[in-house]
Image: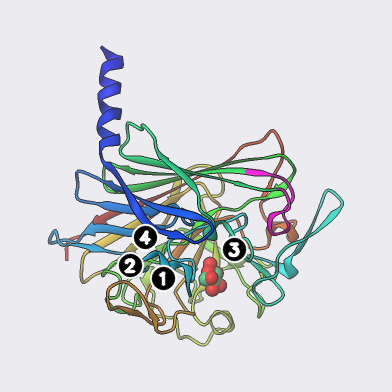
Amino acid sequence: MLAMVAFSLQAHAMQDVASDVFGSIPGKGQVERYTLTSEQGMEVAIMTYGAAIVALRVPDRTGQVDDVVLGFDTLEGYLGDNPYFGSVVGRYGNRIAGGTFKLDGETYVLARNNGANHLHGGVVGFDKVIWDASPVADDRGPSVQFSYVSQDGEEGYPGTLAVTVTYTLAAGNELIVDYEATTTHATPVNLTQHAYFNLGGEGSGDILDHELSLNASHYTPVDSTLIPNGEVAAVVGTPFDFKTRPARIGARISDEHPQLTIGGGYDHNFVLDSGEDSLALAARAYHPASGRTLEVYTTEPGVQLYTGNFLDALPGKGSHVYGRHAGFCLETQHFPDSPNQPDFPSTILRPGERYQSRTVFAFGTAAM
Ligand code: BGC
């Protein structure tokens, strides 16, 4: 009897996953899109190229559903000038200084694709490969697992890394992202999700009016090339304080602060007060006009707040053009450049170990 109940729950969940062909890449193959729908009116679409979220539709406080992530209508858009819209980023999210690090006495040289630095996994990171995908039974809701095997030496990294990323749409309009990986050789791993959110709806303008709170008393300041300078600085009394002074993203973004000048806005790793491993609230964003809220929970020790500073007249979905600050990212992660920063939590995965990380994007609405 119990087994039958479990079976019908699972069968129900799998029915809420639809798939279609999103496009194809000459020489690389077909790209599929999986669409997950919840009973509460949320829908998320994820494609196999980059395991990227291409649409995320949630209701506002009046019930109107809008797509709240930036992106493109077609695969061709994602293959062109694309600042990691909705992608899974890996093998290492954010930057590694000089594209090099030492591990167990060996020096490794990675692809340098951001000036002298390595960014988001290199020239062909996990955002630029086609993943395998299949719906999986999960009694929390519709679920799709994406998998990719990154070869030993890919972009300069040691070890063959087998990665899965599972997206599950759970009750309460929660998108759960579960990351797992194993390796054949010690390697840095730091996986994240690079969705650009605009809770007013993608293309509705800038995100400076969103109110943000972050569960972070510290952040990691950067040098002029956006590499952490090694400091773990207190946010209190600075424009980086979203902990004791939750504020509109735009309230202090133009303050005279050397770190805001370097980033052209916020482009910084916040050190979460919750630490590592247990799933805890990292961030909460609220868009007053629509009433939409987004809470981000994670097991990661950090979150990169990136306020779309480099977006510049990029033609996106529909006839929308994305300008500076058209979206914001909350990239849950280990800290940038950890392989070169002995005082940061370790990002090294060894053979026999399992990398496990979870982030939950929980959508809701709040009254006026
Ligand atoms: C980085 C930014 C970068 C953006 C798009 C963010 O994660 O912190 O510096 O410009 O991704 O590549």
Q: Does mark 4's beta carbon lie closer than 8 Å to ligand 1? A: no
- How many neighbours does mark 3 have within 10 angstroms: few (below 14), some (14-19), or many (20 or more)? many
Dots 3 and 2: beta carbons under 8 Å? Answer: no
Q: Is residue 123 left or right of residue 342?
A: left
Occupied quadrant, residue 111:
bottom right
Q: Which residue is mark 1?
A: 77
Q: Does mark 1's beta carbon lie closer than 8 Å to ligand 1? A: no
Q: Which residue is mark 2?
A: 73
Amino acid type, mark 2: Asp
Q: Earlier in the sequence, mark 4 or mark 1?
A: 4
Q: Which residue is mark 4?
A: 54
Work out how far the residue at label 4 is from the one at label 1, CA to CA, in angstroms: 11 Å
Q: Which residue is mark 3?
A: 120
Amino acid type, mark 3: His
Dots 1 and 2: beta carbons under 8 Å? Answer: yes
Q: Earlier in the sequence, mark 3 or mark 2?
A: 2
- How many neighbours does mark 2 have within 10 angstroms: few (below 14), some (14-19), or many (20 or more)? some
Q: Is label 4 or label 2 in front?
A: 2
- Which residue is more in the foreground, 222 or 43? 43
| Quarter of the rendering occupied by the C terminus | bottom left
Name the secondary structure under disc 2.
Answer: loop
Q: Is label 3 or label 2 in front?
A: 2
Q: Which residues are magenta?
A: 152-161
Q: Is residue 225 magenta?
A: no
Q: Earlier in the sequence, mark 4 or mark 2?
A: 4
Q: Earlier in the sequence, mark 3 or mark 1?
A: 1
Work out how far the residue at label 3 is from the one at label 4, CA to CA, in angstroms: 19 Å
- How many neighbours does mark 4 have within 10 angstroms: few (below 14), some (14-19), or many (20 or more)? many
- The spot of residue 90 in percent (x, y) is 58, 56
Amino acid type, mark 4: Val
Dots 3 and 4: beta carbons under 8 Å? Answer: no
